[in-house]
Image (cartoon, helix red, strand yellow):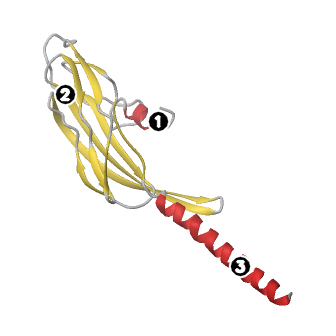
């Protein structure tokens, strides 16, 4: 009977090690894109105004390679602002790290109508992922003639364009 007990103890230890490895393996498999989204600060814009279009990629770990921006064929890109940040949360039995890649574009329509801004694409590990295309409706110019785009500010946040607060609001 003592040999059986010894064997059971060894089997229990192996089982605990196997469960620990399985748990860490599932964490590694989970290390993929948490989200890859494209959105505009508004989906209806007058011909004489610009709008913000942002593509955001959130990763648990790893890196993004080969980013390809959306096709803005019916729009003029006035500015592009890529950024990368790292968010670290500690507590609750562990540390979680996320890398956030963001590409922000200021875009101006070229003509009236409803247009589709195509998918942005990126490579993570050995697979390509893409965003969902976004439709934008361009209406007649509000001032009668197209004007040069003006900086729009978020009250209380100097230097942040209007709509950025809504784009970054986690409830939306």
Residue 56 visible in the shown view: yes
**Counting residues from the N terminus, which is met first, the one under dot 1 or under dot 3?**
3
Image location (x, y in percent) of residue 13: 70, 79
The answer to which of 25 and 47 lies nearer the viewer is 25
Specify the label residue 136 is tagged with.
none
Residue placed under numbered mark 2 in the picture = 108
Q: Residues within 10 Å of mark 1 (few under 14, many from 20)?
A: few
Q: Residues within 10 Å of mark 2 (few under 14, many from 20)?
A: many
Image location (x, y in percent) of residue 36: 37, 44
Residue 16 lies in what quarter of the image?
A: bottom right
Image location (x, y in percent) of residue 73: 14, 31
**Counting residues from the N terminus, which is met first, the one under dot 2 or under dot 3?**
3
Q: CA distance from mark 2 to mark 3?
A: 66 Å
Find numbered disc 1 in the image and state the secondary structure of the residue it sits on: loop
At x 30%, y 29%, the residue is: 134
Q: CA distance from mark 2 to mark 1?
A: 23 Å
Find numbered disc 3 in the image and state the secondary structure of the residue it sits on: helix
Residue placed under numbered mark 3 in the picture = 11
Q: Residues within 10 Å of mark 3 (few under 14, many from 20)?
A: few
- Residue 59 drawn above or below residue 110: below
Q: Is residue 166 left or right of residue 94?
A: left
Q: Is residue 121 left or right of residue 1?
A: left
At x 42%, y 38%, the residue is: 168
Marks 2 & 3, CB-CB < 8 Å contact? no
The image shows a total of numbered marks equal to: 3
Residue 50 lies in what quarter of the image?
A: top left
Q: CA distance from mark 1 to mark 3?
A: 50 Å
Residue placed under numbered mark 1 in the picture = 169
At x 29%, y 34%, the residue is: 53
């Amino acid at each position: 009977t003592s040999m059986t007990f010894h064997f059971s103890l060894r089997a229990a230890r192996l089982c605990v090690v196997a469960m620990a490895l399985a748990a860490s393996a599932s964490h590694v498999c989970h290390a993929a894109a948490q989200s890859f989204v494209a959105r505009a600060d508004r989906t209806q814009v007058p011909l004489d105004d610009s709008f913000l279009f942002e593509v955001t990629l959130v990763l648990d770990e790893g890196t993004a390679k080969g980013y390809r921006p959306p096709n803005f064929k019916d729009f003029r890109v006035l500015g592009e602002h890529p950024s990368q940040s790292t968010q670290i949360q500690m507590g609750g039995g562990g540390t979680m790290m996320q890398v956030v890649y963001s590409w922000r574009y200021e875009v101006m329509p070229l003509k009236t109508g409803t247009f589709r801004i195509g998918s942005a694409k990126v490579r993570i590990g050995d697979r390509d992922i893409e965003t969902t295309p976004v439709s934008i409706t361009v209406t007649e110019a509000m001032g009668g003639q197209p004007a040069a785009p003006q900086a729009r500010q978020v009250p209380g946040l100097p230097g942040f364009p209007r709509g950025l607060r809504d784009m970054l609001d986690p409830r939306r």
